[in-house]
């Protein structure tokens, strides 16, 4: 499966650029509990456009003027499904089964529906419905494959979430971040979504940069869970380079060194620490195996 494989090499190679680090403010991320994080985010979101993890990953992958993702990126599809699972976990809808006395690894534990109440997001609710109605329960890795349609089992193809990128792009259009255009590519026409609100994307990129530079902490459990998830899934989706490319050489090297530290963690061990989100670490482990 292309999205879940080829990630163990860790780091994408930098495309050299002459630009220095972008300047500008960003919203700080707190290292408190989930509840406090949600309160803080709600306060920020009342003043600015709120994006889901899925939308942030897609926005990082979209070319600003062209309005489409790289034709060579075969990782973003499964990465977006990972976003869906983490988003559902952060919202308290999903969890992984207990490790049990034998301390089963994250990748061997099943995904359970904790709360079947709709989230109000069509993609999230569609995935939640599939997981809730599936017996017996399946693992994280299986669900990423099913939701991506990358399975050899024809009985599981019904779980595929279709047109995810297009649906997320339409969400960005509705939020005023992108617009919709038609472009001709010799043999076919394609709907594209060029950027119209550069401020939103600039803030997103600055937020990612600051997470591994000015706001870096050696303890991932002191990082905001959404920000930590964004770093891992941006890497898994092969779009993290887009956020780091504008950095100076020194900042770029430091940022990538710290991302390597995150990739080298023992995810099973991290998931056992107090106050953690096991589902988040299980998704991260699925992309880093």
Image (cartoon, rainbow, N blue to C red):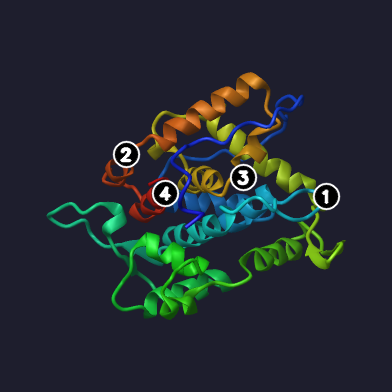
Residue found at x 40% / y 63%? 92
Q: In the drawing, what numbered circle is on residue 266?
A: 2
Distance from label 2 to label 1 (Cα)? Answer: 39 Å
Question: Local crowd at mark 4 within 10 Å, few (<14), some, or many (≥20)?
Answer: many
Q: Going from the N terminus, do you reach mark 2 or mark 4 first? A: 2
Is residue 249 or residue 183 the one in the foreground? 183
Which residue lies under the disc numbered 4?
Answer: 284
SS at circle 4: helix
Question: Local crowd at mark 1 within 10 Å, few (<14), some, or many (≥20)?
Answer: few
Residue found at x 29% / y 45%? 268
Which residue lies under the disc numbered 1?
Answer: 65
Q: Position of residue 53 (x, y in %)?
A: 56, 54
Q: Going from the N terminus, do you reach mark 4 or mark 1 first? A: 1
Distance from label 4 to label 1 (Cα)? Answer: 31 Å
Residue found at x 65% / y 63%? 165
Q: Residue furthest top?
A: 250
Q: Going from the N terminus, do you reach mark 2 or mark 1 first? A: 1
């Amino acid at each position: 499966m292309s999205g879940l494989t080829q990630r163990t090499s860790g780091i994408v190679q930098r495309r050299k650029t002459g630009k220095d680090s972008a300047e500008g403010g960003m919203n700080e991320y707190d290292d408190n509990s989930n509840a406090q994080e949600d309160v803080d985010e709600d306060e920020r979101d009342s003043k600015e456009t709120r994006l889901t993890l899925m939308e942030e990953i897609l926005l990082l992958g979209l070319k600003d003027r062209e309005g489409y993702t790289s034709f060579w990126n075969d990782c973003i599809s499964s990465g977006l499904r990972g976003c869906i699972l983490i988003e559902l976990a952060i919202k308290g809808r999903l969890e992984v089964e207990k490790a049990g006395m034998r301390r089963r690894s994250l990748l061997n534990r099943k995904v359970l529906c904790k709360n079947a109440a709709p989230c109000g997001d069509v993609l999230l609710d569609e995935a939640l419905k599939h997981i809730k109605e599936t017996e017996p329960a399946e693992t994280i890795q299986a669900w990423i494959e099913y939701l991506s349609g990358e399975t050899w089992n024809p009985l599981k193809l019904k779980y595929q979430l279709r047109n995810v990128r297009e649906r997320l792009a339409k969400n960005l259009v509705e939020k005023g971040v992108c617009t919709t255009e038609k472009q001709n590519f010799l043999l076919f026409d394609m709907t594209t979504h060029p950027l119209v609100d550069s401020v939103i994307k600039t803030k997103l990129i600055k937020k990612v940069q600051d997470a591994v530079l000015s706001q870096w902490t050696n303890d991932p459990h002191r990082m905001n869970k959404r920000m930590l998830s964004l770093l891992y899934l941006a890497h898994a989706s092969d779009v993290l380079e887009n956020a780091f490319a504008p950095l100076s050489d020194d900042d770029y090297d430091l940022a990538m060194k710290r991302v390597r530290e995150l990739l080298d963690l023992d995810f099973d061990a991290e998931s056992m620490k107090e106050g953690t989100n096991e589902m988040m670490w299980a998704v991260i482990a699925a992309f880093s195996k």
